Image (cartoon, rainbow, N blue to C red):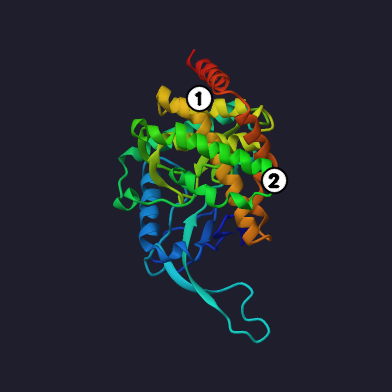
Amino acid sequence: MKELNSYDDRNYFITVKQEHSNPHMDTPSPDGYVLKILNSMDSKNLDYVEAMQSLILHAWENDIQTTRPVLSVSGKLMHVEEIPVEGSGKEDSPVKTKKHIVRLFTYIPGDILVKAPYTASLCYTVGKYAGGLDRKLKTFYNSFYENHGNIWSMKNLPKLSEFVYAVEDSSDRQLVNDVLQKFNEEVIPYYEEFQKGMIHGDLNEQNILVRRTESPADDMYDVCGIIDFGDATFSYYLFEIAIVICYIMIDSTVLEPLIAGGHALAGYVSEMALTERELAALRVCVAGRLCQSLVMGAYTYSLNPTNNYVVTTAVRGWPCLRALWSTSPEILHQRWHSIISTYNN
């Protein structure tokens, strides 16, 4: 057993013996499993978890490689367990517990995206896989998602103004406020013109899995899976590709970040066409997602300074946001169109 990275849940990779007493399981997976302990807040919302699990199963049934929930010995996909709160029970103080939803998922062998070099080919493949996912989710429906959203939903980007105070640098705070203003002026008024559907909502470097190909080149990787549908929502496809580009840019060291984002965009539109109106709004949406990641990371860190994981994007994220925002919409639009055209020839 070993713990895996997580933002606000606890995830553990485990391997098991072949002998077992689970009547709902044939042969245990030789690749192992992921034991997921959901955070106590989300664990209170059973409708949310059940809807998410139906979405995961739909994706898997439509050839999207993702982790699948496993039935327990009692035939359930989830259990609510009382777990001691870390740090309680010391110095004769009572042990405090909270209720958490506990689930077991199959494990997909591979590396998280951030461990692979972001070549043009891989960036394109990531975008294409994201577009394919959104296309296949068009046939999914669950009434829960009609009104579901959280602070990470890009439709809630204006609410980010409530957390900007957590950013220490005044010039960075002003930059975030500028992006939020542009989002209100250039994105929200055109919602009715944007295409909508189910989106993953958090296709970042930790949630996309890759595996080295059999190519003789050492840096050739392919996407082998997508995990963590916790932020899935019925929203705009424009937001999905904006999120993909955001995280591609942050960790791109092989290519200049804006160029890497262009290759991801080219892959996405090969599966899901975007209108000119959507493409025109993309720059502001990418900047908006960068702001979400940076501001919420700073805010979460201010509440728990021991959680360094939540500020991992800050080192490269702020330079990416500044570079993106200092590039005129016309120039960026032209560069991305040029990259897309190379794949159409």
- What's the amino acid at mark 1? Ala
Q: Residue at x 65, y 33 (%)?
A: 322
Residue 223 appears in view: no
Residue 272 appears in view: yes
Mark number displayed over residue 266: 1
Q: Residue at x 37, y 66 (%)?
A: 75
According to the image, label 2 marks what residue?
169
- What's the amino acid at mark 2? Asp
Q: Vertical placement of 277 versus 143: above or below? A: above
Q: Position of residue 199 (x, y in %)?
A: 41, 41
Q: Vertical placement of 76 versus 65: above or below? A: below
Q: Position of residue 37 (x, y in %)?
A: 51, 63
Q: Residue at x 48, y 34 (%)?
A: 241
Q: Residue at x 60, y 44 (%)?
A: 112
Is 307 on the left or on the right of 343, as rendered? right
Nearer mark to the viewer, of 2 and 1: 2
Is 176 on the left or on the right of 145, as rendered? right
